[in-house]
Amino acid sequence: MASSSKPLVIIGAGADYTKGIELPMVKQLLPEIARFLESEGAEFEKTLRSHLPNMRFTFQRHIKTQIDDLTKKEPTELRAYVVRVKEAADKIQDPKDPAKKQGKLVELLFNKLMSIQSDSVLGDEIEGLIKEVFDEPTAKEILVSDSVVDFHKVTLSDTFKSVLRYILGSSLEEDANAVAEALGADMLNIEQLLIDKFLGFYNEKPGDVKSYIYISWCFWAFMVHRQRQILAAHDGVELPFYSGIPENARAITLNYTNFLEERLGARDSLYFHGDLSKYVSMDTRDLISIDNFPNRGLLDILKKEVLENIKLEGESLTEQRHVIPALVPPLRLKPVLSFKYIELWYQAAQWIQSAKHIAIIGYSFNTSDEHFNDILRANHGKRVDVISPNATGDHMQSRMEKVFSIPIGNWKTMQVQGHDARQANGIRLIAARADQIDLEKLFEE
């Protein structure tokens, strides 16, 4: 088969959630990492922290910060917390279950917070009277705020904080209940945490840079550890989903795991967001491969490849040296960690442009991946199969309207390999898990 006509597979996080791989989804990651650092990763964490003097970040302190910052959240963010927690609590059948009562407690507390926030807004009537009572310059001077109370400066009570601190703290434990996990999924989102701290490289905040180095390398260590566990468990056995990718295909992955390269080789595998076997020197922007990556222990890599290249002396960031995992932070505007990523993203666009048939698996088209979505938009009109358990749902159809300009009402119902599907303008939405679709047959159609 000619290179230009090779089928293309695009892989999102859902593929690594396949049974038998079961890497946690992004909103489950931070609690899993915290538990890893207290068990198998304890020595790694201790060694890393000892090299970062006065590094104040801890996951417990992060919980406190998230609670303290609740009054700075927009109403839509607070409402999202309530919706997620309520959904988790509603699924609990036993009305006496403590977790169900926790869910109701959180719902009531957040509704009270939103009510106070809403009631503090001046409103049209008060603003109108101010404009009538005072002349225009004076009214403009008075209307510097749109609320009676500066809600951002309001302090939550100890009762409110204690309730959330207990529930969020329990979300880090292995036996966390569904409500605690639901609350932690939004308030302890590692992607948002990485975004907040990564900006320290641009804002020249050494404390945030130090925290980013710590969090990103802990994240890296957890991912490498889990990847090696999965590969060891499948030694001599085919890896779920990945073993079903046709050998004559090329693939772009938005994941960090090395499973794809194990299947197709480096030539036909492209890691859009980076991978676990490389790191970036932030002063020179060089992308560096970890020598003999598969066969070295985490501590050995940390001591000889990472810590040897981190120098934190000097007050200015320009006097320091930092190395971070080659994992592109999930910013909507993707930072260019290295010029190599410019080449890589251009190559991804070329592969998408040349492919006649594309299967997109376990990818949700989130706005945090707008850079990748833009590449798909620019290649609109191709034959595309989107495979995800929720592919036919309203959310996915809404995203298809944003990315491919397909109105929600245009989809026609059909079946693909026995699974519910929708079709419009050459695009099919197939409601199936990554391992439930025969990709060989899909590309032969």
Image: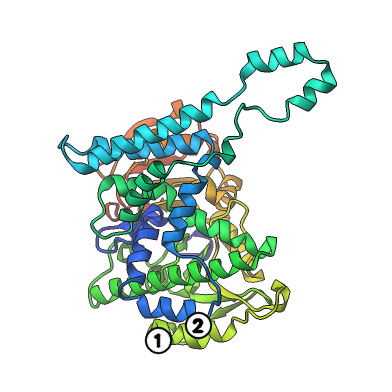
Q: Which quadrant of the figure contains the N terminus?
A: bottom left
Judge whether 158 appears above or below 321 on screen.
above
- The residue located at (43%, 87%) in the rendering is 300
Q: In what element is the residue under mark 1?
A: loop
Judge whether 175 appears above or below 411 on screen.
below
Check disc 1 and report the residue beneath it: 296
At which x and y percent is residue 257?
A: 41, 68
Check disc 2 and report the residue beneath it: 290
Residue 397 visible in the displayed image = no
Residue 356 visible in the displayed image = yes
Residue 158 placement: quadrant: top left
| Mark 2 Cα shell of 10 Å, populated few (<14), some (14-19), many (≥20) | some
At which x and y percent is residue 391?
A: 37, 41
Q: What amino acid does circle 2 point to?
A: Ile
Q: What amino acid does circle 1 point to?
A: Arg
Q: In what element is the residue under mark 2?
A: loop
Judge whether 146 appears above or below 44 on screen.
above
Q: Earlier in the sequence, mark 2 or mark 1?
A: 2
Question: Outermost residue toward the front?
Answer: 158
At which x and y percent is residue 387?
A: 37, 48
Marks 2 & 1, CB-CB < 8 Å contact: yes
CA gap between label 2 and label 1 equals 9 Å
Q: Which one is nearer the viewer's eye here, 200 or 266?
A: 200
